[in-house]
Amino acid sequence: MQVHSHPIHHPTLTKGISRPQLLACGVLILTLGLSVDFRQTRSALVTPANAADDCEQVVQPKATLSRSGLAKFLTIPEGKPRQAIRQFIHQPYCQLPKLHIRAGAVAEREAYPLGFDPRHWLVVLYEGDQYAGFEFVLHAGS
Amino acid sequence: MQDLNLSYMLAPRPVWQAWGHQLLLLIWAGLVAIGVGGCWQRSPHPTIEITLYQNWQLQPGDTLAGYTVAGGLGDISLVLGGQPIYAPYAGTTQLDQRGCIFYSAENVPAYMLRLCGVSTPHLGSVQAGDEIGRGSMLHLATLRKQPNGTWAMVEPDQTFIERLLQHP
């Protein structure tokens, strides 16, 4: 009976793949794995807050906000009356539910999709007749 | 004399084995560098710095006669007993230099909450109903943005505080 002697170390582990190549592949996979920010993945998987979902009443279905309208809006300081704001941004797409954040004040919120970037909406908050502030909200549905 | 088997040293070694140690070291160094670099960029959530409209002398986190100021004028203190605080809406949480959490909701402009005394804070983006943190004693301030860019402490509505304490 003939006994075949095999070298202890053989550079080729499997057909066509040498160990350095295997190591390089491993490093590549590990690098890719480490590069992925799972927290971003999580926030991408979870549906972000959606102003449109919150719409209580649609006011102007075709309303969008132009770049120049937004630019003018951003120059208006907080505390101005609603009428001063409406001169530049007109009727909103919809109204969000009223909130009670501050004792004795009702917060009304109006939403405007941006005409040049429909993924983002502008949400404007009023208390009584007074403009209190704004926020850009990511609109998941677009 | 000890019988040393030196045959493995004399035998021709494949290239991969000769460079194996160096290659492994290089790989580990690379992985450590990636890990450290990645953590450096991601782990610290930037702290928030705001200017309060009411410039009172004592603020939460200050030290007075060797004691820590837990809550200040304008705070509402709640005995939580380790129970959680929930985000009423999707938004963002950040810490300030004094270790208080600032929570702002995406759909609620002009307002921000300051939560002091919270342990195990959940920082970054939060969804509605997510736990922001827990605490034995919560000191809560409701802040409203002013035209000059400062934040004024205002009296919060009772229903809004309830939403922080009850899971939706």
Image (cartoon, rainbow, N blue to C red):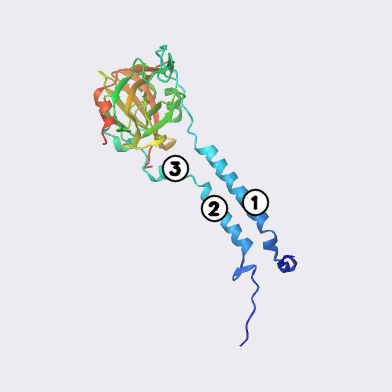
Both labels 1 and 2 in a single chain: no
Residue B165 point in image, percent of width and height: 27, 31
What is the C-alpha distance between the residues marked 1 and 3? Answer: 28 Å
Residue A133 sits in quarter: top left
Depth check: give the residue in front, B167 or A130. Answer: B167
Depth check: give the residue in front, A120 or B47. Answer: B47
Residue at 38%, 38% in the rendered image? A139
Q: Which residue is mark 1?
A: B26
**Mark 1 belongs to chain:** B
What is the C-alpha distance between the residues marked 1 and 2? Answer: 14 Å
**Mark 2 belongs to chain:** A
Tag 1: amino acid = Leu
Q: Which residue is mark 2?
A: A30
Residue at 70%, 66% in the rendered image? B14
Residue situated furthest bottom in the rendering: A1
Q: Are marks 1 and 3 in contact (CB under 8 Å)?
A: no
Q: Height in image: A116 above or below B5?
A: above
Residue at 59%, 61% in the rendered image? A22
Q: Which residue is mark 3?
A: A39
Q: Secondary structure at mark 3?
A: helix
| 10 Å crowding of disc 3: few (<14), some (14-19), many (20+) | few
Tag 2: amino acid = Leu
What is the C-alpha distance between the residues marked 3 and 2? Answer: 18 Å
Residue B148 point in image, percent of width and height: 43, 15
| Image quarter hosting the C terminus of chain A | top left
Q: Secondary structure at mark 2?
A: helix
Q: Earlier in the sequence, mark 3 or mark 2?
A: 2
Q: Height in image: B99 above or below B146?
A: below
| Image quarter hosting the N terminus of chain A | bottom right
